[in-house]
Amino acid sequence: MAAGMDGMRASGVTVETDVAVIGAGPVGLFAVFQCGMLRMRCVVVDALDAIGGQCAALYPEKPIFDIPAHPEIEGGALIHKLEAQAAPFTPLYLLGRRVETLRELDGEWQLGTSAGDTIKARAVILAAGAGAFGPNRPPLEGLPGYEASGAVRYLVARREDFRGKRVVIAGGGDSAVDWALSLKEVAAHVTVVHRRPKFRAAPESSARLDAAAARGEVEMAIPYQLHGLEGDGSRLTGVVLSTLKGEQKAVPADHLLAFYGLSMELGPIAHWGLGLSHSHVAVAPATCETSLPGIHAIGDIATYPGKLKLILQGFSEAAMAAHAIHPRVFPGEALHFEYSTSKGVPAG
């Protein structure tokens, strides 16, 4: 049942497994490990083309400070370690698709994906974060062509991609400010576009950006907003800006980074009868089980009294869900709790 680290992208797969994990972010990956430690096989489905969820898609090079034993670790590095931790249990990754249907069948669950896959599982762990997400795109003519070439992007996977380049960054939140401060160290020129002087970023970061602008390390285009793109439809040469009064100017650019936030939606999950509470799934705190037996929700999508939206709490929920699922996969078999230091890592 194993697939390569890049995951399986062929459509129309039919597979039977012990646990179907929906979401390949950090909490979903740790759920694979916890299930594996209890000898339960997993299939992992994610709408993105790579594992890692928001950690990989939005801030692979941004440090995270609240992971136990790691005073500081970048999002991409955390995902790499979680992937390696789950690897001994040979999970099957079905990437670039989302689960569209869920129905009970003879005491088990059958899932159908947008790629025509059929997954039969004894239990389901929903680790879908806040649901499917995508960037809020600026309404600019010719945008798809520049997106396809990578000239217009909504996240930074590698700083080195921008070394020696002219970069325009649009937005007023933490992502825009943080990446302006980071990319000024490698880019030939960085221009920050915002419609007003006040940013929504952390005050300390905003102050650092103001100081960098005063030193001439970053150009501030305020109060401007995006108006158009210049280039041949693929290669970008400039970004046209405008004020609310209609004044325009063109800024030479090789890349446009638009940080206007994400649009998130639960998608088909909202119609599965899971007992939603403000776009989150209510679960039993001790087991993370939803209103449907055998369906468990963990991570950001799950809610219960006292819930904290922290990765480390999601890790704990993954362990609780796996232990709660064990009797469904191995009915009648007693589960004797053992520490990993005693039993080691079982063979996948």
Image (tube, grey):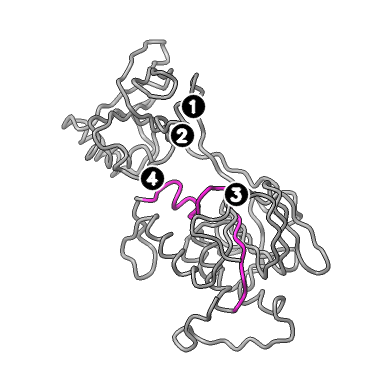
Q: CA distance from mark 2 to mark 1?
A: 8 Å
Q: CA distance from mark 1 to mark 3?
A: 22 Å
Q: Which residue is mark 2?
A: 260
Looking at the rendered image, the quarter that the N terminus falls into is: bottom right
Closer to us: mark 4 or mark 1?
4
Mark nearer the N terminus (3 vs 2): 3
Mark nearer the N terminus (4 vs 1): 1
Q: Which residue is mark 1?
A: 138
Q: CA distance from mark 4 to mark 3?
A: 21 Å
**Mark 1, residues whose alpha carbon is within 10 Å: few (<14), some, or many (≥20)?**
some
Say if 344 sits above or below 273 in the image.
below
Say if 214 sits above or below 88 in the image.
above
Which dot marks residue 131? 3
Closer to us: mark 4 or mark 3?
4
Cβ–Cβ under 8 Å for marks 1 and 3: no
In the rendered structure, which amino acid carries the disc numbered 3? Gly
Which dot marks residue 108? none
Which dot marks residue 157? 4
In this view, the residue in front, 38 or 3, is 3
**Mark 4, residues whose alpha carbon is within 10 Å: few (<14), some, or many (≥20)?**
some
